[in-house]
Image (spheres, rainbow, N blue to C red):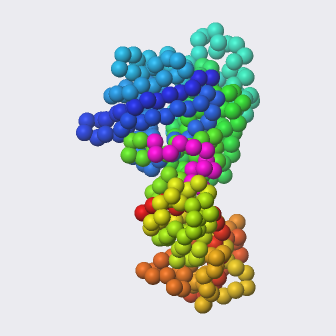
Amino acid sequence: MRQLTLTDLHKAFGELVVLRGLNLAVSAGSFTAILGPSGSGKTTLLRLLAGFERADAGTVTIGDRVVDGPASYLPPERRKIGYVPQEGALFPHLTVARNVGFGLRAQQRRGPRITELLDAVGLTGMAGRYPHQLSGGQQQRVALARALAIGPEVVLLDEPFNSLDAHLRASVRADVQAICRGAGTTAILVTHDQDEALSMADRVAVLRDGRIVQYTAPHQLYSRPADPALARFVGDANLLAGRLAGAAGAAMVQTVIGLLPLEPHCAAAAGGGQLTVLIRPEQLELVPGQAGGAVPHRADGTFGGHVVGYEYYGHDAVVRVRPDDAADGLEVTVRTAGGPQLAVGEPVTVRAHGPVMAWDR
């Protein structure tokens, strides 16, 4: 196991600047997700780590070895990095065993190593099959076994679950997570799927405009994003105008849906001006048995409104509500347990639960 350190990385393709001074330190043995929208530089970053591209400036260090820097460069085959591409990229004319052993020396291919790897990824007895005889999930397991065969110090996963259906995707990514943890391998997953990043990783790095804008534990990223744009990107977000009320340390924020407690240690508490307030849909609940109408705002953030949209998902539902006294057509999104559908125009009462995150406007 080795720590992976990226320092002031820059990469451009002609006039297109992709990475702009990126810094990241990934702990040995950890599972990190690189999250970002399409075109943010995720795949370019992975190709730099693997050695398929060279950085224009900055360094890539694995343990105490600089594998890419101004004065040094180690080719991909000497980096001890396993790589799992998006589609598996198996050789169709080779058996499962020969695909897994492709990067090994000849004597290692004849030993127990292949069988051990196939057992580890749940493909016992499938050594003699060909890729076309496997399901999509099995092919991805073969690709993972091939990446682990060389005993890598780092495994790179380039959106490997994209081609799988929803049920299989959940199953395979749980298996991949368990296998990487069991092997003690430092793993980096590139994805644009927020649920995937939050559920699999020890820490998540969000890439935007060629830089890491936040690198933290999944629950911290979701509950305390660095800025409003990041809040919108990671999950559903209600962003409301507000103003600080009360003293720092016991601060409250006044919004159109009522007075809400501010997240402890929130930097906005030291400001005192106008705020942008984040409240997640699951922090809002429909109050049973109460219609909307003239429900006064109280300190607990209870307010009346009318349903303007309803989406039912079985396990839960998303309700869009327009507060009765909100200006400019403001709507808030409420996530609630699935149940009888609410009609558009139906009056409801909503209660907000803090604390909430906020930033200076």
Query: Which residue is at the front of the view, 224 or 207?
Result: 224
Is 242 displayed left or right of 176 in the figure? left
Give the answer, above or below, for where 225 lies relative to 105.
below
Residue furthest toward the left?
15
Residue at 45% x, 20% y is 67
Residue 344 in sight here: no
Tell me if residue 218 is in the magenta stretch.
Answer: yes
In this view, which residue lies farthest toward the bottom? 294
Q: Nearer the viewer, residue 19 or 224?
A: 224
Q: Residue at x 71, y 75 (%)?
A: 339
Q: Percent position (x, y) of residue 62?
A: 52, 22
| Residue 7 vertical placement versus 243 (above, below) | above
Which quadrant holds the C terminus? Answer: bottom left
Task: Please provide percent x and percent y for residue 70.
Answer: 35, 20
Residue 302 horizontal side relative to residue 239, left or right: right
Check the image and name the residue furthest to the front: 247
Res. 296 image quadrant: bottom right
Q: Which residues are magenta?
A: 212-224
